[in-house]
Image: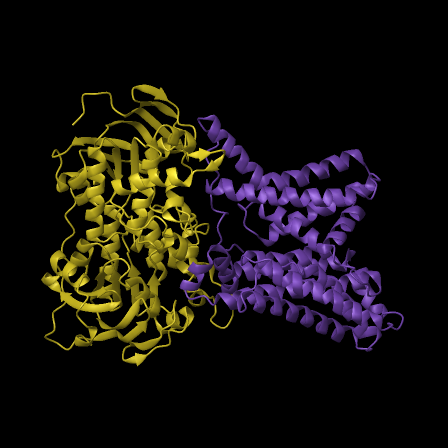
Chain colours: A yellow, B purple
Amino acid sequence: MPTDTVPLLEVTSLSKHFGGARALSDVSLQIHRGAVHGLVGANGAGKSTLIRCLAGVVAPDEGEIRLNGAPITIGSPRAAEQAGLAFIHQELNLVPHFSSLENILLGARKDTRLGLINWRESRKAAQAAASRVGMTFSLDKRVDELSVAEQWLVMISKALVSNSAMIAMDEPTASLSDTESQRLFRVIRDLAASGVAILYVSHRLDEVLELSDQITVFRDGRVTHNARRGELNKRGLIRAIVGQDVETIERAPKVAQLDAVPDVVFEAIGVTRLPAVKDVSFEVRAGEVLGIGGLVGAGRTELARLAAGADRLESGSFRLHGKQIDTRSVYSAVRAGVGLVPEERRSQGLMLDKSVAFNMNVGVLRSLRAMPAFPFLSAGKVRRRSRSLMDRLQVKARSTTEPVRSLSGGNQQKVLIARWLTPRVKVLFLDEPSRGVDIGARHEIHQAIRDLADTGVGTVVISSDVEELSTLCDRVVVLCEGRLTGELSGDDITEEALIELSYAHTVSSGEHS
Amino acid sequence: MSSPTTTGRGVALPDTSPRTEGARKRAALLIVSRYGTLIGLLLMIIAFTIKAPGTFFTVDNLLNILNQGALTAIIAAGLTMTLVVGEFDLSIGYVASFVGLIVVGLMAKSHLPVVLALVLALTLGGAIGSVNGVLVTKFRINAVIATLGIGTALTGVGFAYSQFPIASGVPHSFTQISLGKLLGIPQPILIMAVVLALLWVVLNMTDLGQKMQAVGGNLEAARLSGIRVDRVKIFAFCTAGVCAALTGSLLSSTLGSGTLAAADGYLLDAFAAVFLGSATLRDGEFHILGTLVGVLVIAVGFNGLSIFGAPTYFQPIFKGLILVLAVGLSTLARRYAKA
């Protein structure tokens, strides 16, 4: 590895404060050409602030950044781009109704002839970049018709077209299936081999360990480790991130299996909404956490939305304690006792400018009235509920009046879960509950889900994370292309079994219902 | 009397001893955006008090200012409700004019008692508002278009209605509503106080008000938490309609007759006031107290203009610039709160 040459990017003693809070203090690291550089750390540890400094979004207070040995100031995103630094964020900045070609060339210097775009030459350049990342689909396809994995390839091609020397990727595999991730890793390795530096930010430690030539660990705004490949194993990495030894999340206690007649809380019977969900039936038992596995796009989110009344059923029904419930609107589903913690926390879950208390209480306002017959809220009840939930879920916020916008992803997620912790909710769907959440918060969220199940609430967890499904869930049903392809329980919930079912196109769901 | 679930109040100001110029600039802008409106109001009051001693800062003139602002405050408070749920209502001025004609007609032409005429007028306003709400929610017509269309149509209906000659005069008790005083305070001020207090309570102390704020905060999230967002929005439009009807009726009471298009101009005043208000104390959020401050800024400004004998053409200049300034401040507040 080219460690003895001048590094592509050298960061020395970088510091950044926001108000009174120190986001980065005395951070130094070197990013080399042709290497994959992993960036890990809990949310708020400083990774994203560093990225934002490099991307020219925020200006560091102190410290120096050198590009190819020469000091530079990255004063704007434009300056970062000119320096050859490309940044791909989770929410891919693509123009949805543009073709891949147009997106790849967006903002790039295009070949022009007499001031008009020379599409033929431009297309050649884009095509060259696209084939470097193994894009097999037509460049003329609109990007909103592409899968997330394909969209990532478009973003990477875009970075290549502008001759980026470094490409930073923020949680690239968060919404990718395992196979898609593997394919992306291959692209990343190829890019590194061709001399591009890759800055790889992820909470998925296995990936980081597998991919990275160098790993930088952040904690509380400082760099705690700068490790080469092989110097840290997963346990060591976790210790470095958390700052102490955490017991690996112990396997959840499994419910006594099938010897007694299970107490069924919630059932889906022949649930259908084409094209996403086809004739799906399953049941949720009291005290268990049911997982829903499958590839992204298999119909898992759509299924949860049907149960929660967010979308209308075409056929089939849902039953709660044996009685069919009305899911024609979210209102009626919630009244019946179904809750949903949606996949997109920020856009579908939270009122970002409102307080922690507001967000926790917004679904149960009626129960917080001073007197049931009058529409006035009891300030005491509002305060007590939010405070006790804040304690129970270990929400880290200065107070219940702090806007949720300023909380970390994990704590925002806890606020959303807290919203549904009310006796009225009998079954709770959680869509990717720990996505983009750091390890500590993830553990606490899992604990909260487990506790909820123990109180008899039917809990259903949708996850793309095999480890999450196997450690948290008692049973997992798997969807593939909208159909239920199988069920696993206990120790049978393994990566191999999940993947097999995720691709089991041929199994008809009729066998399971 | 505090409402624990609203944001903003408990939020500490950012560290005001920043280490860098950027942070200092940001803190300064945040202060301007939160307190700029209040500071501006205060400066105007101080300046007018000094420049026009014995004229501006007198009980009579201050009551006069409040009295002139009262009708704007009522209609603006209704508008605030629609903005809280994230919608718009451009019909309020037309609704006020229309209802102002109808209420006079009900008394002068149909010889209904004053109270009944008023009740019908407010009901009519609520009904028009509800129609706006249904068009926006159930028929998914953009609020700007729906309310502008309904408002314009009402202008025509009002014109048709006024074609029939209105028998002269409205009852004395009707004109007394806005001309009368209670404990030395002009009644419109008292009516305004009641309306504003009522809407403040609804927004901050009832579950309906919290739902309105949730809908405005994040529509999809509100829906997914089980809130019937359409109903909440329709309620907001309905309230705006009632408030507009009240303003229109009070205006007719002041004028002693029904006049075509009399209240159309309130639309702009109301928008200016509401946006100024959203940049007051809260970071770009619409709220009743802010709206009142916004109304006062406009009323004090107008009062100053007339005390100093500024030509009338200054009035639209002042109004227009205030509106632009208000929206600018409001945007600024939102941006710096979230940066």
Can you see residue B228? Answer: yes
In this image, B52 relative to A267: left or right?
right
In this image, B174 relative to A1: left or right?
right
- The x and y percentages for residue A152 are 30, 46
**Which image quadrant is residue B250 in?**
bottom right
Quarter of the figure with the N terminus of chain B: bottom right
- The one nearer the camera, A157 or B318, is A157
Q: Residue furthest top?
A: A70
For the point 69% across and 47% down, the residue is: B296
- The x and y percentages for residue A11 are 30, 25
- The one nearer the camera, A36 or B298, is A36
For the point 58% across and 48% down, the residue is: B278
In the image, residue A278 above or below residue A181: below
**Which image quadrant is residue B131 in?**
bottom right
- The x and y percentages for residue B111 are 82, 77
- The one nearer the camera, B307 or A232, is A232
- The one nearer the camera, A376 or A22, is A22
